[in-house]
Image (tube, rainbow, N blue to C red):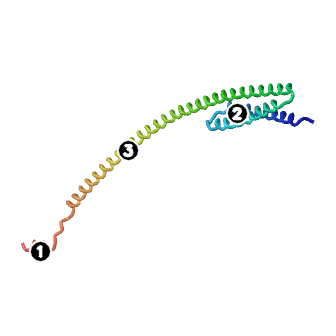
Amino acid sequence: MAAPQDVHVRICNQEIVKFDLEVKALIQDIRDCSGPLSALTELNTKVKEKFQQLRHRIQELEQSAKEQDKESEKQVLLQEVENHKKQMLSNQTSWRKANLTCKIAIDNLEKAELLQGGDLLRQRKTTKESLAQTSSAITESLMGISRMMSQQVQQSEEAMQTLVVLQDLHTPIKIFPQQKHSQGLM
C-alpha cells in the first residue's frame, strides 16, 4: 500500500495538471473572445481564480517535497515543482499576450462601430436636412394654397356685391300706400 504522503503528492500532481489545463482552456477562450469588455473581464476573473488554485497546489507539492525523508525523492519532487512553476509562468505570459490581443481586437471593433456610427450620424444629418427641405416646401405650398383661398374669398365677396347691386337695379320699386295717396293728391 502506498504511503499517505505518496497519495497526497499524486493528488497534488493531478490537480496541478487539471488546473493547468483549465488555465490553458480559459486562455484560448480569451484568444477567441471578440467582446464585449465585460466578457473579457469575466474570463480574466476565472483565470485569476485558476492561477490561485494552481499556485496553492504547487506550494503544497513543494511543501511535500521538503518533508520527504529520502533526498532523492525530495530532489525529484523539487524538480517537478520547478517544472510546474515554469509552466505556470509560461501560462501567465500566454495569458498576458491573449489579453493584449483581445483588447486590441475589442478596441478596433469599437472604433469601427464608432466610425460606422459617424456614417449613421451623417445619414441622420442628411435626413434632417431633407426633412427640413421637405417641411419648407410643404409650408410654402400651404401658404400658396392659403393665398389662393384668400383670393377666391375676395373674388366671391366682389361677386356677391355685384349680385346685390344688380338685384337692387332689377327689383321693381314698390310704392308704399302713403306714397300712393300722396301721389294721387297732386
Which residue is at 20% across, 60% downward? Answer: 169
Res. 111 in view:
yes
- Residue 92 drawn at (x, y percent): 69, 28
Report, in whole angstroms, how far the alpha carbon at label 1 lies from the one at label 3.
66 Å
**How far apart are the alpha carbons under marks 3 and 2?**
59 Å
Left or right relative to 75: residue 42: left
Q: Are marks 1 and 3 in contact (CB under 8 Å)?
A: no
Task: Report the side of 56 relative to 115 (left or right).
Answer: right
Mark 1 vs 2, N-terminal side: 2
Q: Residue at x 81, y 32 (%)?
A: 64
Q: x%, y% of residue 82?
A: 77, 26
Circle 1 or circle 3, nearest the eye: 3
Secondary structure at numbered mark 2: helix
Residue position for label 2: 29
Above or below, comparing residue 153 to residue 42 in the picture: below
The x and y percentages for residue 60 are 78, 34
Disc 3 vs disc 2: Cβ atoms closer than 8 Å?
no
Q: Residues within 10 Å of mark 1 (few under 14, many from 20)?
A: few
Using the image as rendered, state which of residue 182 and residue 116 is in the foreground: 116
Q: Amino acid at mark 1?
A: His
**Percent x, y of residue 177:** 15, 74
Tell me the amino acid under the disc marked 3.
Thr
Q: Is residue 21 visible?
A: no
Q: Which residue is mark 1?
A: 181
Name the mark nearer the viewer: 1 or 2.
2
* Comparing labels 3 and 2, the label whose residue is closer to the camera: 2
Cα gap from disc 1 to disc 2, whole angstroms: 122 Å
